[in-house]
Image (spheres, rainbow, N blue to C red):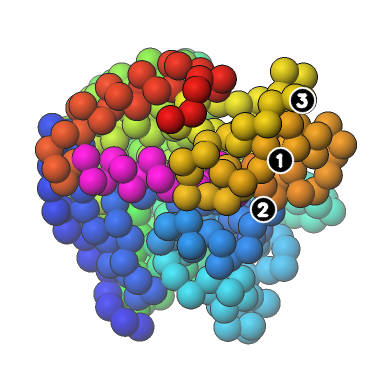
Amino acid sequence: MTAPFSFRLLANDGMARRGEIVTPHGRVATPAFMPVGTQATVKAMYPGQVRELGADVVLGNTYHLMLRPGAERIARLGGLHTFMNWPHTILTDSGGFQVMSLAQLRKLTEEGVTFQSHIDGSRHVMTPERSVEIQQLLGSDIQMQLDECIALPAPREDVERAMRLSLRWAERSRAQFETMGGPGRGQALYGIVQGGDVPDLRIASAQALGEMPFEGYSVGGLAVGEPQDVMLAMLDVTTPAMPVDKPRYLMGVGTPEDILESVARGIDQFDCVMPTRAGRHGLAYTRYGKVNLKNARHADDPRPLDEASDCPAARDYSRAYLHHLVKAGEGLAAMLLTWTNLAYYQTLMREMRAAIEEGRFEDFRAKTREDWARGDLAPLD
């Protein structure tokens, strides 16, 4: 262990925050985007590539790693950092999202969740205590409480029931984390704010969690079917109710626009499968917005995606060639476009951090939105 978990704010510009997280496996500059490595791999990328793009932290999935290859096996093999050859910070989610996404394969009670494996049909019980135990076996630096995430829209009574259950699970998760010695190893456990699209429930959840001794706090249950304006409205009421001196993590978000607008509302950490999933389906994210390489209009376009990019995938290959790879179903298409997308996300985060430090975040925000509005066939500067 090099250092215990800590967080400090370095600058503010309006609600936007520039900070630094320290974990036993390194420093994380915030605002930070965390590439998703669900099954101990960021799809179509080498770990070294992900690091070279500027990622300080990646995310692993407790539910999926529990099923395959198994948390106990990973522990015997030296933990998740060694297993996936990522010696930097790792965050693991709790399995709570699968409570929603695998609703047809689970049974929910006060005690926890019983899952039917989507792989082989075997049954597994995930309680708040077991979720923390698995994350401890994985050895992740930042761990998450088990919560119930419900799809929106939903009736208020369902939203409140899930929020109250998540608070009770938060207490149990914290007790297990301390029993297993997580704080002594410099690890962190985050609480998760729930409350759907109901402002007073969001505030109540944030305030109740803030009274518990978590190292950080997450906003969960958004980007699950609600419009973007609803998500942002929930952040408007939630982040002011969250502790100022702890990191704030918006789970599962999102598009570059989602991230830009959420940073403006005080969020420090993000994760999303979008850049990697989009890359596997022919979609690139650039400083000029989205580029769908499936479209025939790219077939004769000799320009790269962005000739000024630091990323070779975006700079050194023509749109015509990328279009060909996508249409031909070549694996190189997924590799190059995933590389392009993660590079752009990390560039966006780096530029936001600089803008906050220099007190020009609002100007940066406006200019970035203007660039996106110009479209994917704008002349390259």
Local crowd at mark 2 within 10 Å, few (<14), some, or many (≥20)? many
Label 3: which residue?
A: 299
Label 1: which residue?
A: 280
Q: Which span is picked out in magenta?
A: 339-355
Q: Which comes before the other along the chain, label 2 or label 1?
A: 2
**Disc 3 and disc 2: Cα gap in Å?**
26 Å
Q: Quadrant of the C terminus?
A: top left
Q: Which is nearer the eye, 318 or 341? A: 318
Residue 340 falls within the magenta-colored stretch: yes
Q: Quadrant of the N terminus?
A: bottom left
Q: Which is nearer the eye, 77 or 163? A: 77
Label 2: which residue?
A: 43
Labels 3, 2: front one: 3
Q: Is residue 59 visible?
A: yes
Instruction: Indicate the amino acid at tag 2.
Output: Lys
**Which element type, helix, strand or loop, lies under badge 1?**
helix
- Give the vertical position of 68 relative to 139 (above or below): above
